[in-house]
Amino acid sequence: MGHVNNVSFAAYIEAARTMLIQSLLNQFGHDGLDFILARVVIDYRSELHYPGSVDVGAKLTRLGSKSLTSSYGIFADDKCIATGESVNVFYDMNLRTSVRPPEDVAEAVRGLING
């Protein structure tokens, strides 16, 4: 059809999501604390054509008891071509289960959401 495949948009959001959340978690060094994807939604607003580049904006928007919601905008040539939202769950890799975030992580997330 002459445009970038929709799966590429998920990859753009994944790259932004992992950079955003992992950089946050790396600040605290809680052994085994990670995050897993529970939900992703993408709204396609315009076609994207190859070759080119995109910019992805990412923001934390909600902290749940064990989850973290983030929102995204994908831009090409200053035009918003897609928006997205993901829900990630804090996960203890040692216990292999979802967990509440440690208070220092939760406090940092609240600060980013409200700041």
Image (cartoon, rainbow, N blue to C red):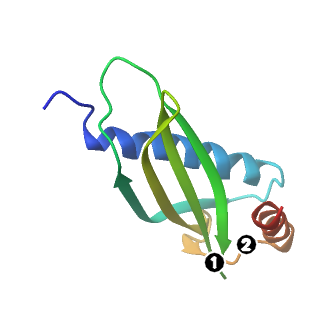
Is residue 96 shown above or below 53? below
Measuring from the top left, give residue 43's x and y in whole percent.
36, 56
Give the x, y percent position of residue 34.
63, 59
Residue drawn at (34%, 17%), measured in percent from left and top? 51
Q: Name the residue that disc number 1 marks.
A: 66
Q: Secondary structure at mark 1?
A: loop
| Image quadrant occupied by the N terminus | top left
Residue 1, compared with residue 109, is above or below; it is above
- Which image quadrant for residue 9? top left
- From the image, tell me which residue sits under label 2: 101
The residue at the point 79 percent across, 70 percent down is 106
Judging depth in this view, the residue of 5 and 37 nearest the camera is 5
Residue 21 relative to residue 27: left or right: left
10 Å crowding of disc 2: few (<14), some (14-19), many (20+):
many
The residue lying furthest to the top in this view is: 51
Q: Quarter holding the C terminus?
A: bottom right
Q: Residues within 10 Å of mark 1 (few under 14, many from 20)?
A: some
